[in-house]
Image (cartoon, rainbow, N blue to C red):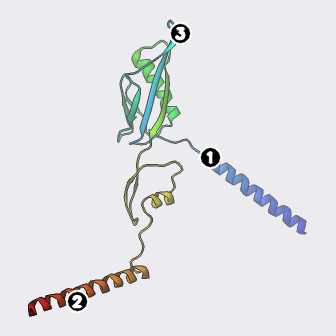
Amino acid sequence: MIEAHRSCVRRMFMGLGAVLLSWSAAHAESYKIVSDDRIRLRVVEWRAAESQYASWAAVDGVYTVDEAGNLSLPVAGQIRAGGLTTEQLSQDLVKAFTEKAGLQTTPSVALEIAEHAPLYVGGSVQRPGRYPFENDMTVMKAVSIAGGFLRSREDNAYLLRDQIQAAGAYRTALSNRRDLLMRRAR
């Protein structure tokens, strides 16, 4: 009886492990480009007659994805980037450069995310605002970067601090009053 129970529990944990593994594999998607991402682009073309690669200096550089999710590039023009992975965008750029430049051979395109779009933290945090994106960003990490959640004003620490500050201000006012009365009496 006990062995049957152990076997049942073992199968349940194995099933749970399989579900978690399949869930994590299904949700391990590649990063999708968004507005305000900065893309570093480098394009080279193989020139067989010279037996060397030639860099496209006019195209190489860092480009920002606009609000509509597009990149504006020399030669290729407007290219949709938002919602694509870097691999998908690279393939689209190869196609666009080949067609627009009328090339016989396809150029090699290397691109990477030079800078991720900024992150905006709002609500009940110490310092709401714009922050740079960091790898492995979680909601709690973003809240920590923004100084953490605001503390409730009913907290005793605030009341005690306010009481001490008020007592000090009151003593200062009494001292100033006494000094003024003494000046007037002279």
In which image quadrant can residue 175 be found? bottom left
Nearest to viewer (mark 1 / mark 2): 2
What residue did someone put label 2 on? 174
Q: Name the residue that disc number 3 marks.
A: 51
Nearest the viewer among 174 and 60 is 174
**Horizontal relation, residue 119 to residue 184: left or right:** right
Helix, strand or loop under label 3: loop
The circle on residue 120 is none
Residue 145: give x, y in percent of width and height: 45, 58
Secondary structure beneath label 2: helix
Give amino acid for label 1. Ala
At a point 43% along the width and 82% down the height, the residue shown is: 156
Which mark sits nearer the N-terminus, 3 or 2? Answer: 3
**Relative to 35, is 139 on the left or the right?**
right
- Toward the top, the furthest residue is 49
Q: Earlier in the sequence, mark 1 or mark 3?
A: 1
Image quarter hosting the N terminus:
bottom right
**Residues at marks 1 and 2 touching, judged by CB atoms closer than 8 Å:** no
Name the foreground residue: 69 vs 148: 148
Amino acid type at image mark 2: Leu
Residue 29 in the image: state x and y as whole percent: 57, 43
Quarter residue 120 falls in: bottom left
Query: Looking at the rendered structure, which numbered label has been put on residue 26?
Result: 1
User: Horizontal and vertical percent for residue 13?
Assistant: 76, 59
Identity of the amino acid at label 3? Ser
Of discs 1 and 3, which sits in the foreground? 3
Residue located at (85% from left, 66% from top): 5
Q: Are marks 1 and 3 in contact (CB under 8 Å)?
A: no
